[in-house]
Image (cartoon, coloured by chain):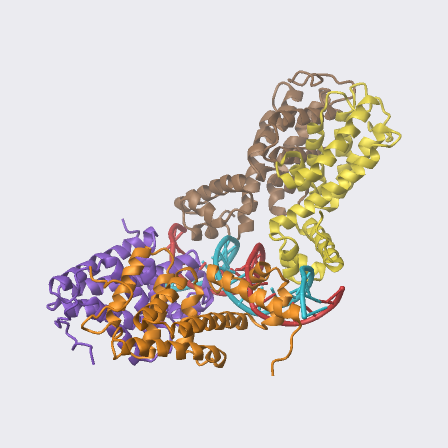
Chain colours: A yellow, B brown, C purple, D orange, E cyan, F red
Amino acid sequence: MTPRMRADALRNRAKVLAAAESVFAAKGSSASTEEVAKEAGVGIGTVFRHFPTKEALLEAVLIELLARFGREAEELTRAADPGAAFFGFFRGVVAQAATKNAVSEALEEAGISAREASAEVGGPLKKALATLVERAQEAGAVRSDVGLAEVMALLAGSSHAAASAGADPRVQARALDIVFDGLRPADRGSSNGQPATRR
Amino acid sequence: MTPRMRADALRNRAKVLAAAESVFAAKGSSASTEEVAKEAGVGIGTVFRHFPTKEALLEAVLIELLARFGREAEELTRAADPGAAFFGFFRGVVAQAATKNAVSEALEEAGISAREASAEVGGPLKKALATLVERAQEAGAVRSDVGLAEVMALLAGSSHAAASAGADPRVQARALDIVFDGLRPADRGSSNGQPATRR
Amino acid sequence: MTPRMRADALRNRAKVLAAAESVFAAKGSSASTEEVAKEAGVGIGTVFRHFPTKEALLEAVLIELLARFGREAEELTRAADPGAAFFGFFRGVVAQAATKNAVSEALEEAGISAREASAEVGGPLKKALATLVERAQEAGAVRSDVGLAEVMALLAGSSHAAASAGADPRVQARALDIVFDGLRPADRGSSNGQPATRR
Amino acid sequence: MTPRMRADALRNRAKVLAAAESVFAAKGSSASTEEVAKEAGVGIGTVFRHFPTKEALLEAVLIELLARFGREAEELTRAADPGAAFFGFFRGVVAQAATKNAVSEALEEAGISAREASAEVGGPLKKALATLVERAQEAGAVRSDVGLAEVMALLAGSSHAAASAGADPRVQARALDIVFDGLRPADRGSSNGQPATRR
DNA sequence: GATGAATGAGACTTCATTCAT
DNA sequence: AATGAATGAAGTCTCATTCAT
């Protein structure tokens, strides 16, 4: 069913994808395909053989990213402390965004986009994240009136804020703590793995 | 210091700036300079006479935007209800972002950028916003442990989330309410002009 | 109504068009736009300013050609000897084709294409050619059972045959005489301006 | 002299050639080599193993075509009615051209080209066609003052006219009848297998 | 021999910027 | 000052051809 690829082709595809992620992360999605090819150490033709348009390449990068987040979320689904799991996942995603411009784009796309392709991978992420949220709510670590959609919007927004290159990391951390406080139940139970953020 | 300009030149500069804001808001900053010229009803040469590079034009648009926000913040500084003033301002900025792609870029730039030019206008905004925050804190509407920097980061992040075209506006509103809750003191006093957001 | 163009722009447009005609004539329509630009002595951007796609450029060349033929036909419409006029026009077109690869393409397009643009200019050519045919038929120089469509098909075919670079011109001439004989009435009246072709 | 080839290699060569004929016929000679490979059901490497350049492949297709015409002509050489044989052959070639873009190219090449390779196969066609013409002339079906060269030029031109996709087939047929009339002796003996074309 | 992945020159096209009118 | 034509570097993509598997 999966059309078998030659080992070298598979290797090159991976190299290109990795290069693309790194280049787009560093310079934004307007970086040139040529640059991706150079970074990957392949000819420009090879990039286009694997991803027939630049858009397809971009999409593949985003899908890869979402898949990775999906796997992380899925693992945390089985963690002992649901509150820590949820907030830890959130923090981890945002931290990656701090170095990767493309992350927030990916998250937005996942949250919104009707692109079928993305859906294939956005689906798993959403599913695992939904579980993370529910478990945290049951454990009283997250207020019960927030839904998946709001969480994704906050994730995207926080990631973007973090991606704004140059901002002081301590400011970022404190801003994120504020969002986390907003996500906790009104009585502010801690059960979060982090000390309460009020200073 | 200000080199006197002919009245018509001044008028053209304003037309170009307005057109640029509208075009970049609608199509993002990758819209072409030519399109700005057409929207402004002037020749492309005129655009470049007033703004020697595209980057300069973009920068002028952002400065203009920040200046407008600065004026709005400044006015609200004298409002009766400091909590309502602060949250109202926040909400207003985010609402504009929902239709203008460029807004979040502008806010990031203001929060971070070392660009001297921006600083000229980012300054007034920061100053007025700082007052808004302080007054809201004194009135007990905003927790006392947040600083201007965090507020700007949250403003930028929220604006960007809102700018992600296509998201359900109700989701956006609820996500914003969560951020607001995070900004309030732990005891959740109201004094906010909005009913408490817990549902 | 006609949007006035600057004199230099008009001059460049003409230079590009002439260069395109010459280049495409010599190397076929797959010659590169770059080459046209070089031949015209302008930058590549100038070519694309006047003709937004390569296809548009090609079309403009064909239209120009048809217009020229249309004017020639129109003039011959008023000639003293209708038979000589018709056959002379035919011969002239074919002679041009002998050096210009693009001519037969143009004629085919005119004969067939539904392209509106071409129609604008193909129309006059068809009209004048129809008159040429009718007058030649009334004068007994062309058989009465041929229509405009057949004449255009023969014109296109003969032009293409002539365009096949390298064929002996004397052979071309004799082949054309055979077609002309086929176009004359069965009794082979002369009134043709050319001596009867039987040798 | 002929380097022995493995049976499967020979089979692949034939598959590629057939695919090339079909693809170039349908899409013109600018169709990609890749497409030919796909149509043949072989890898691109195989195409280039058998035909070292695209030009060589194109040439092989033309040679194949001319060989086929040569065989048809050769057979008709022995037909009972020489007039019918000649005009029938002519009509048959043109009819094929109507669906195959490459035919007229092939005929031109044959008529003109100094390419040695073509000559090898163009030779037989020319020889057989010459016989066809002579016999038709002896039988009084074709005027005595036309030579092989003119006939080939008319064949190429007529084929091209027919290949101009989209022309009304009835127009094509009438145009061809006109050429045939031009090829007949002045007195218009019929002996042609077709009723006289005058209408 | 066959395969198809890799290559890179070159095609078309866009657009920021310059300059003659 | 204003205009818009001209410029050419740079971007995306195609395809004939080569080469490792």
Position of D63 with respect to B89 (left or right) is: left
Residue A152, by quadrant, is top right
Image location of residue D87, percent across then percent down: 32, 68
Can I make out residue C94 in this image?
yes
Image location of residue C26, percent across then percent down: 39, 72
> Is B189 placed above or below D199 here?
above
The residue closer to the viewer here, B197 or D62, is D62
Q: In which quadrant will I find the C terminus of chain D? A: bottom left
Residue A160, by quadrant, is top right
In this rendering, the count of numbered labels is 0
Q: Residue furthest right?
A: A80
The residue closer to the viewer here, C31 or C4, is C31
Q: Residue furthest front?
A: D80
Position of A105 with respect to F14 (left or right) is: right
The residue closer to the viewer here, B139 or C100, is C100
Q: Residue at x 14, y 62 (%)?
A: C137
Position of A19 with respect to C198 (left or right) is: right
Q: Residue at x 66, y 32 (%)?
A: B158
Q: Residue at x 60, y 27 (%)?
A: B169
Image location of residue A113, percent across then percent down: 62, 36
Image location of residue A148, percent across then percent down: 71, 28
Can I make out residue C27 in this image?
no
